[in-house]
Structure formats: C-alpha cells, structure tokens
Image (cartoon, rainbow, N blue to C red):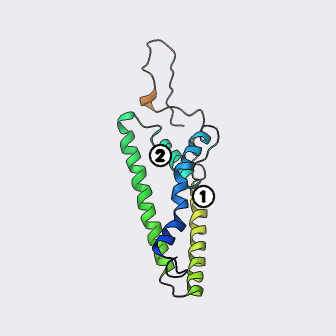
Amino acid sequence: MQQVWGYSALQTGLAVAPGPLMVPVFAAVAQRLSRTVPVGRIGDGLGLPTILSSATDDLPADRAATGSAVVNVGRQVGSVLGISMLVVLLGSPVGFHAAHTAFERVWWATALVAALAGVATIGLTPQTGRIPPPWQCPPPIPEGPKLCVLSTT
C-alpha cells in the first residue's frame, strides 16, 4: 500500500485495521451461532473459537492445555508457511502493472489452496451420537447396564 498506492505508514495501518478489529466481534457472534449452526472454518472471528474449543473438547482436563497448544502451534506454523509462500509469489513488483500481475498470481494461488483445503476437510464433521472416550465414561456398575460401549467398528 505504501509503495504502490503512496500511503503513509499511518494510512496503511488505518486501512488494514478494520480486519483485526472485527475478529472479537465475530468471535462473540460465533459463540452464539455455534450452538445451533456449524460455523467452523469461516474466517478467524467465526472459525478460531470453534476450532480451539473442538480441538480440546474430547480431551481429559489434564491434557486440554497441551491439546490447545498443539492446535495453536499448527496454526502458527501454517501462518508462517502461508505468508512465506505469499512473499515468494509476490516477489518485488515495481509499478502498478507488475503489482497487479503479482496480485492476480497470489489470488489464484490462494484460491487453489483454499479449494484443496476444502477438499481435505470433507468428512471431518463430528458424528452425532458418537461414543465418548474412555475417560468420559462413568465407572462400571457391577451387574448393571453398560453405559459406554467402546467399539472399533
């Protein structure tokens, strides 16, 4: 924005500020929507709270922090790799035409990665009525009905 459009550092900061400012707003919206509508993987504000809570949902309490940390590490590594790829694809264009061509190249690469990610996530929706993990099962009652049946099928 500074080199191609001639924005000052302050103008550039103000131009990109609305995006990060919307994250907490949509996180609050996502919290209410996620009870009735699956809103995961729709932007940071809607997806991040859902991803973090679902990543630790099935973990025992003593492993929830580790599970959350693993998800955050994966998210951070993905961000670093994505931004690195963006910089490689953008290069150092000089002038509007070169910058526009680089932008189109990055846009198509982003669209391709998004499509591949969409295909990769098919089937990742949690099953309803699933069997709880062993640590969430109540202790067995002698000669009583089994409340949790663990199955590998």
Q: Name, please, the residue furthest toward the top.
A: 143
Quarter holding residue 116: bottom right
Image coords of residue 78 (percent x, y): 45, 61
Q: Amino acid at mark 2?
A: Leu
Give the mark nearest the N terminus, 2 or 1. 2
Q: Is residue 60 above or below residue 11?
A: above
Q: Which of 128 and 98 lies nearest the eye of the viewer? A: 98
Q: How many marks?
A: 2
Residue at image mark 2: 52
Q: Residues within 10 Å of mark 1 (few under 14, many from 20)?
A: few
**Residue at position x 51%, y 62% from top?**
17
Q: Position of residue 27 (x, y in %)?
A: 54, 47
Is residue 80 or residue 132 the one in the foreground? 80
Residue 118: image tag: 1
Is residue 66 left or right of 12 when viewed as pictured?
A: left
Could you classify mark 2 by the number of other residues whose Cα lies within 10 Å: few (under 14), some (14-19), or many (20 or more)? some
Say whether residue 44 is visible.
no
* Disc 2 versus disc 1: nearer the observer: 2
Placement of 63 over or under 86, stated as above or below: above
- Location of the C terminus (image quadrant): top right
Q: Secondary structure at mark 2?
A: helix
Above or below residue 15? Residue 47 is above
Choose between 68 and 24: the one closer to the eye. Answer: 24
